[in-house]
Image: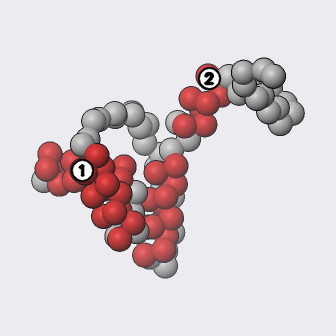
């Protein structure tokens, strides 16, 4: 018996460039735009802002608490951290 199982779902594996393009589409920006549309009856065009990725280490407990907070407050960790940074740095 072989050491690993391979499952192919047809088609080719996406290239790194294709994955980067998909990530750079900005899921958070789309999410934030949806929040704005929900909160107002007038929809204005949303300007797409170029995003950069940030990686950070958290303790297991901090990560658990962050995820619980996000679930309890119906938000994403990336949006929460971005809002905290805006309040801390830009206000």
Mark drawn on residue 27: none
Name, please, the residue furthest toward the right. 10
Observer able to see residue 81: no
**Residue 18, horizontal then vertical, whole percent:** 65, 28
Asked whether 65 or 70 is in front, the reply is: 65
Reading the image, the residue beneath label 2 is 17
Q: Secondary structure at mark 1?
A: helix
Q: Nearer the viewer, residue 25 or 77?
A: 77
Q: Nearer the viewer, mark 1 or mark 2?
A: 1
Task: Residue at 26%, 41% (x, y): give it.
Answer: 58
Measured as percent of width and height from the top left, residue 74 is found at: 40, 68
Residue 35 falls left or right of residue 82: right
Q: Position of residue 8 (x, y in %)?
A: 82, 32
> Depth check: 28 or 62 in front?
62
Asked whether residue 42 appears in the rendered view, the answer is: yes
Q: Position of residue 21 (x, y in %)?
A: 59, 31
Q: Which residue is mark 1?
A: 62
Q: Residue at x 34, y 70 (%)?
A: 73
Instruction: Give how far apart the Cα atoms at labels 1 and 2 are.
Output: 33 Å
First in sequence, mark 1 or 2: give its number. Answer: 2
* Quarter-of-image position of residue 19: top right
């Amino acid at each position: 018996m072989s050491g690993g199982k391979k499952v192919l779902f047809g088609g080719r594996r996406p290239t790194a460039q294709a994955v980067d393009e998909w990530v750079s589409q900005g899921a958070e920006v789309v999410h934030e735009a949806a929040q704005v549309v929900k909160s107002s009856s007038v929809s204005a065009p949303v300007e797409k802002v170029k995003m950069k990725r940030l990686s950070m280490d958290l303790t297991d407990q901090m990560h658990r608490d962050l995820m619980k907070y996000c679930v309890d407050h119906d938000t994403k960790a990336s949006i929460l951290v971005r809002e905290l940074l805006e309040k801390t740095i830009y206000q």
